[in-house]
Image (cartoon, rainbow, N blue to C red):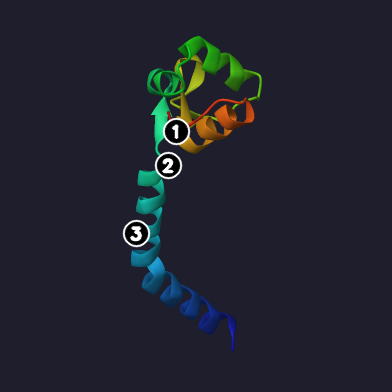
Amino acid sequence: MNDRDLKALGEYFAKSMEPYLSELVATITASDPWLDTEKAAAYVSAKPRHLRDLAKAGQLPHGRYGNGKRAEYRFKRSALDEYLSSNGRRTDE
């Protein structure tokens, strides 16, 4: 099998798997959404500033939406659940 055949096989595989992968990504995203700081704070019963401080200190996984100083923090619900459970708080309340 030459490079051209391998490339064609890869493209065929990617194209045939795309609908399944799209559905999987949509399912994962729906079950573990990104929350903005306000919603995340409400979810864990904390102040938004506390979550930002934890994120800045590297104690809470997060993402950023936007660029520069105005970028907003985003938190995965699963990361918030993990943080709460590691700190002795219930997450199913």
Give x and y (percent) for residue 70: 45, 15
Q: What amino acid is at disc 1?
A: Asp
Residue at the bottom extreme, as displayed = 1
Which mark sits nearer the N-terminus, 3 or 2? 3
Residue 34 in the figure: left or right of residue 5: left
Q: CA distance from mark 1 to mark 2?
A: 15 Å
- Reading the image, the residue beneath label 2 is 32
Question: Disc 1 vs disc 3: Cβ atoms closer than 8 Å?
Answer: no
Quick one: SS at disc 2?
Answer: loop
Identify the mark at residue 23; answer none if there is no mark: 3
Identify the mark at residue 92; answer none if there is no mark: 1
For discs 3 and 2, the disc positioned in front in the rendered view: 2
Q: CA distance from mark 1 to mark 3?
A: 27 Å
Q: What amino acid is at disc 2?
A: Asp
Q: What amino acid is at disc 3?
A: Glu
Residue 38 quadrant:
top left
Residue 82 in the figure: left or right of residue 42: right
Residue at x 40%, y 19% (from the top left corner): 42
In this rendering, the answer to whether 18 lies above or below 2 is: above
Give x and y (percent) for residue 3: 58, 80
